[in-house]
């Protein structure tokens, strides 16, 4: 039976109910699993239901932890727990089993989160959509004909539909922020090095990717980052800790911030009118709150960003694919991987060390340029998508005849054009569900901070959440009783 008001609480709210003994962690586990059974047939966002794992987590979770008893989902790419089976959204990797916890998984468990299942991802997390040959399409709970985003689309649909208040996600080109925008969620991509990648991962995607989560509230995001942030054993790089805590920053007034408004990026498609209109509405809102806004044009070589990022992604995906091939005994071919993925692998096999070194040099040049621009601003504001949320089938990773460059341009220079740059720079960036489009789908805005500037972003995010509340804005597909806006 689903706890009647379950979907009206964020993670901290549920943990408070547990602390006051108004509900038990076991009841929350069962509610989440019943929620999966209720909405997953329509959404196809959860791959595995894991009540036994959740009960095991409960036995070791500290009762004093901030999210004690709160149900949680893990994406089938990146973070993992001992005994977890996964597929990375691919027939090639189907059945891979992990022999240990990743450090981030241990920290999530220590924060009190209980893993009730795993979520869908596109093949090798290489799409701004979450549709795969292996698992089919993950649907958006706001409109089943539209994408839930990617690559953490399963997590996005699960949190947006009320299955859990928090779900694991990661971001190497927008994979936290895109599902946040598509599903109406809070999606923080922390600063490079803020969250651990070990022990079996080092410089995740050569520094482009970071692990974290999707949430419905700002305070959940801030409290979780407090719980999991910091270097792990043998880390390659880290970032300065917050002055107090991210949660306390979220509860503090941001003061008057200098905000740079980014409407257009070099080499990218011009955003649709509705995206620009909502960008301007956000600017007006910020100015009404006392912030100083001005338009800024970012300058860098779009061609070099494009080519260098493709080389980095291809190198990492090619490596993972060969690892998965060894683990499963399956060969890498058209029967085990999708068309674009196979083209990416072939491209990776042709790259040499010098070409990868050039890619890192180009990334450095671009990052330094944006870093210099940030001297004049506390925050940058941009849309997330250049247009409305994609329909299912639009971003087809298994389309015949598509080459890697065309695929990349379709994703990063026509659709989710505002996210990849900040994987290159490593800056923290948070997406907030401020608006709805005329079609009724969410329309999020992205706020980008200075390196290590999550405190500023959380403070601003909480101010905006107070000024323009979204907690009661729920999609048609939602677990349990639905509160009307």
Image (tube, rainbow, N blue to C red):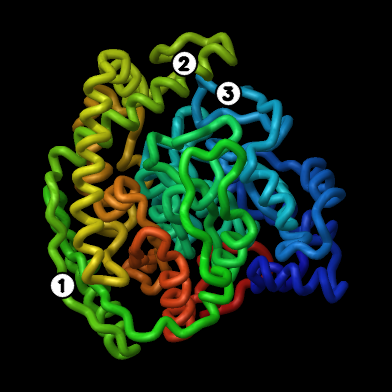
- Please give the residue where the numbered disc 1 appears in the rendered image: 295
Q: Position of residue 451 (x, y in %)?
A: 37, 59
- Please give the residue where the numbered disc 2 appears in the rendered image: 322
Q: Nearer the viewer, mark 3 or mark 2?
A: 2
Which quarter of the figure has residue 276? bottom left
Q: Are marks 3 and 2 in contact (CB under 8 Å)?
A: no
Side of 77 relative to 113 (left or right): left
Compare residues 101 and 277 and report the one nearer the observer. Answer: 101
Sequence-wise first label, 3 or 1: 3
Compare residues 30 and 112 and report the one nearer the observer. Answer: 112
Question: In the rendered image of this protein, does residue 31 appear above or below residue 341?
Answer: below
- Please give the residue where the numbered disc 3 appears in the rendered image: 94
Sequence-wise first label, 3 or 2: 3
Which residue appears at 52% of the width and 70% of the height?
Answer: 243
Whether residue 47 is visible, yes or no, is: no
Q: Position of residue 352 (x, y in %)?
A: 26, 16
Question: In the rendered image of this protein, does residue 69 appear above or below residue 210?
Answer: below
Q: Position of residue 394 (x, y in %)?
A: 30, 42
Compare residues 21 and 377 and report the one nearer the observer. Answer: 377
Task: Sort mark 3 into few (<14), some (14-19) or many (20+) by Cα contacts within 10 Å.
Answer: some
Whether residue 340 is visible, yes or no, is: yes
Give the quadrant of the N terminus: bottom right
Q: Position of residue 423 (x, y in %)?
A: 34, 47
């Amino acid at each position: 039976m689903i706890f009647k008001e379950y979907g009206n609480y964020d993670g901290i709210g549920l943990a408070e109910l547990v602390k006051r003994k108004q509900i038990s962690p076991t009841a929350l586990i069962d509610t989440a699993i019943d929620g999966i059974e209720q909405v997953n047939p329509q959404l196809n966002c959860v791959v595995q239901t894991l009540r036994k794992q959740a009960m095991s987590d409960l036995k070791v979770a500290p009762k004093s932890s901030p999210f004690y008893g709160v149900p949680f989902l893990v994406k089938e790419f990146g973070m993992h727990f001992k005994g977890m089976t996964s597929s990375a959204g691919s027939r090639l990797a189907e059945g891979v089993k992990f022999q240990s916890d990743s450090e981030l998984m241990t920290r999530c468990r220590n924060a009190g989160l209980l893993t009730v299942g795993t979520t869908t991802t596109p093949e090798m997390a290489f799409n701004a959509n979450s549709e795969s040959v292996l698992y089919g399409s993950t649907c958006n709970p706001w409109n089943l004909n539209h994408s839930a985003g990617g690559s953490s689309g399963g997590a996005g649909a699960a949190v947006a539909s009320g299955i859990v208040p928090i779900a694991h996600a990661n971001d190497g080109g927008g994979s936290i922020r895109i599902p946040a925008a598509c599903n109406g969620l809070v999606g923080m991509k922390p600063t490079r090095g803020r969250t651990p990648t070990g022990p079996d991962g080092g410089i995740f995607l050569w520094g482009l990717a970071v692990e974290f989560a999707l949430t419905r509230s700002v305070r959940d995001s801030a409290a979780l980052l407090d719980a999991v942030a910091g270097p792990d054993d043998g880390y390659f790089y880290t970032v300065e800790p917050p002055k107090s805590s991210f949660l306390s920053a979220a509860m503090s007034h941001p003061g008057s911030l200098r905000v740079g408004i980014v409407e257009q990026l070099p080499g990218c498609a011009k955003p649709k009118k509705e995206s620009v209109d909502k960008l301007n509405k956000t600017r007006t809102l910020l100015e009404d709150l006392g912030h100083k806004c001005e338009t800024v044009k970012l300058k860098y070589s779009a061609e070099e960003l494009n080519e260098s990022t493709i080389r980095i992604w291809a190198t990492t995906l090619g490596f993972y694919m060969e690892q998965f091939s060894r683990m499963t005994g399956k060969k890498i071919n058209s029967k085990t991987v999708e068309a674009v993925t196979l083209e990416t692998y072939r491209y990776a096999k042709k790259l040499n060390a010098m070409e990868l070194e050039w890619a890192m040099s180009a990334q450095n040049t671009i990052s330094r340029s944006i870093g210099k621009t940030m001297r004049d601003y506390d925050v940058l504001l941009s849309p997330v998508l250049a247009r409305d949320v994609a329909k299912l089938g639009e971003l087809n990773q298994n389309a015949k005849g598509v080459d890697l460059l065309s695929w990349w341009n379709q994703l990063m220079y026509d659709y989710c054009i505002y996210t990849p740059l900040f994987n290159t720079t490593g800056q923290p960036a948070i997406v907030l569900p401020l608006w709805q489009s005329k079609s009724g789908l969410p329309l999020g805005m992205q706020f980008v901070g200075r390196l290590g500037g999550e405190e500023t972003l959380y403070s601003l995010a909480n101010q905006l959440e107070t000024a323009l509340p979204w907690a009661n804005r729920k999609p048609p597909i939602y677990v349990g009783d639905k509160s009307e806006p």
